[in-house]
Image (spheres, rainbow, N blue to C red):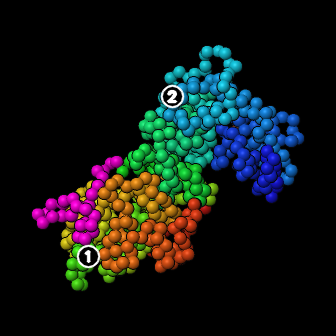
Amino acid sequence: MPIVTIDGREVDVEVGTNLIEAAKQVGVQIPHYCYHPRLSVVGQCRMCLVKIDGPPKLQTACTTQIMKDGMVVHVDIPEVQEAQQGVMEFLLINHPLDCPICDQAGECGLQDYSFKHGQAFSRFVFEEKRTYPGRERIPLGPSVMLNMNRCIQCTRCIRFTEEISGTGELGFFQRGARTEIGVFPGKELDNPLSANVVDICPVGALTSSEFRFAERVWYLDKKPSICTGCDAGCNVTVEHKRGAIRRYKPRVNPEVNDYWLCDYGRQTFRRYSEFERLGTPAVRGAAGELRATNWEAALDRVHQGLARASEGADLAFLGSGFLTTEEAFLIARLADAADSEHRSVWSEEGPARFIPNLHGGVHGTETTPNRRGAELAGLLGTSGINAEDLMRGDGASRCDFLLITDGDPGSPLHDAEVIGRLRQVRFLVVLGWASTPLTEVADVVLPIATHAEKDGTFVNSQRRLQRFRAAFPAPAGVRSGVEALVDLLGRLGPEWQGLTTAQVFDRMAATVPAFAGMTFDSLPAHGTLLDTSGAVASGDSTEPEGAHP
Ligand code: SF4
Ligand code: SF4
Ligand code: FES
């Protein structure tokens, strides 16, 4: 591999690597606007000028590929700094500098580079700036708003719609200093990936119609997590203010979602504010009313329900595709303790989702993120009463005991007929985070954490096992599913008492072949592909190479 020297630091890189990427490898930041690692290189903004030994003039780092040994590059020298200041001065001549009312403030490439690479004055003495009257608040589509005054004409958004979403709604219109961004006549920016242009716009020209003015970004805490919108398993950053999620942003995982998220997935955190939150365990009293109680009393009641299920009676365990793999493993152990084969996972097929990446992309086909993980962990009964029998048949009427995890309310659990069928069971336990028609008819309700409040793993449609951690603590009175289930299993045997999610995973890895040799804390950041060797019975597909919607 060719060796290049950047600011005195040697690095060997793949042939064809450009100078921006090579510099990153030795911790040198070359400022850039128009360059994005997944878009074609246009060399348009001139922000990435560097000095290369040999050529007389400064060169753009984004367009300079390293093909052979010996290139010597200078970034931190006065000649380059002067060029950077010059480019910033030009960019700011016409910029409105309306940071106090701009949604991008706090995460703006223009602010950051002005601070690092600009200067504190301008030689441009005219008061009049070029503006685009009437083009300050233009909805380009349902998710994206344009303020043309702030655009620096980097064309990232245009290239995204041409090269990534493949929809081509955006283009440049007019010429010279009047050049502006817009949608082609008769089109709007309305494709499943449209909001990604907001993420890649380096300034506040493109903002999110949903997030606009909702929060100042410096008030947000940011934690890595996984989208639960479907089984593609896109990596997200949860941005929240004291436990109230304000937005999801894509978190780079080249093996899954690369730099992108779909518009649907970005909005899925809203389900957490659509329903009333369960805050305390509840048990049904002698008079038939649900009354609040403490965790000990509620778990004792479940334990009694399990124990009282008469000899030879049917006990069923219905998991959801929103369970973490560890929670599913613990429910499967409960089913083992009850000697029950009636265990299954409910997950609905959903609208097809697709996220492109360098390997082609990832498809999401289910409405839940972890049906595969829950089944692998032991909730795939080979015989007995299954999810279909319970939801659409008379399975519940044949059971003495039914434990349902209603982690995120799926549509059937709001259907009176389905609830009527489930309620035919003698003793109904529901674990969930939301108050729903199902929790209202349960004998015991256990309030558990949302996925943003707990640690765990999901297995996506590629069979990639991915770990996530709690973004913020659950409210008082609410436990993670693992805490609740470990406490319940602890009543059946001491070996489960007090286990953490990591310890549950490690115990699962010791017994479930698909996870053999893994530990929770050593799972790779980008996840790991499971060798399931046909262990997952249904609904799996391999990703077609080069597929694109
Ligand atoms: S709207 Fe944003 S991404 Fe598009 S050209 Fe202007 S600055 Fe670049
Ligand atoms: S494709 Fe699925 S996992 Fe990815 S962002 Fe969309 S809904 Fe979320
Ligand atoms: S990043 Fe190189 S010219 Fe824009």
Residue at left 72%, top 38%? 48
**Mark 1 secondary-structure assignment:** helix
Residue at left 28%, top 50%? 276
| Labels 2 and 1: the sequence-earlier one | 2
Residue at left 32%, top 78%? 492
Residue under circle 1? 306
Location of residue 512 in the rendering, given as x and y in whole percent from the top left corner:
48, 77
Badge 2 vs badge 1, beta-carbon distance below 8 Å: no
**Chain part drawn in magenta:** 273-301
Q: Is residue 491 above or below residue 274?
A: below
Location of residue 103 in the rendering, given as x and y in whole percent from the top left corner:
50, 34
Res 339 visible: yes
Q: Is residue 208 above or below residue 326?
A: above
Location of residue 511 in the rendering, given as x and y in whole percent from the top left corner:
47, 79
Q: Is residue 179 above or below residue 437?
A: above
Please state if 49 lies on the left or on the right of 223 as rendered.
Answer: right
On the image, which quarter does residue 380 sit in? bottom left
Res 396 visible: no
Location of residue 421 in the rendering, given as x and y in whole percent from the top left corner:
22, 67
* Mark 2: C-beta under 8 Å from nearest atom of ligand 1: no
Q: Quadrant of the N terminus?
A: bottom right
Please state if 136 lies on the left or on the right of 38 as rendered.
Answer: left
Residue at left 72%, top 52%? 25
Out of 125 and 143, give the one closest to the viewer: 125
Question: What's under tag 2, amino acid-wise?
Answer: Pro
Crowding at dot 1, Cα within 10 Å, few <14 / some 14-19 / many 20+, comes out as many
Residue under circle 2? 100
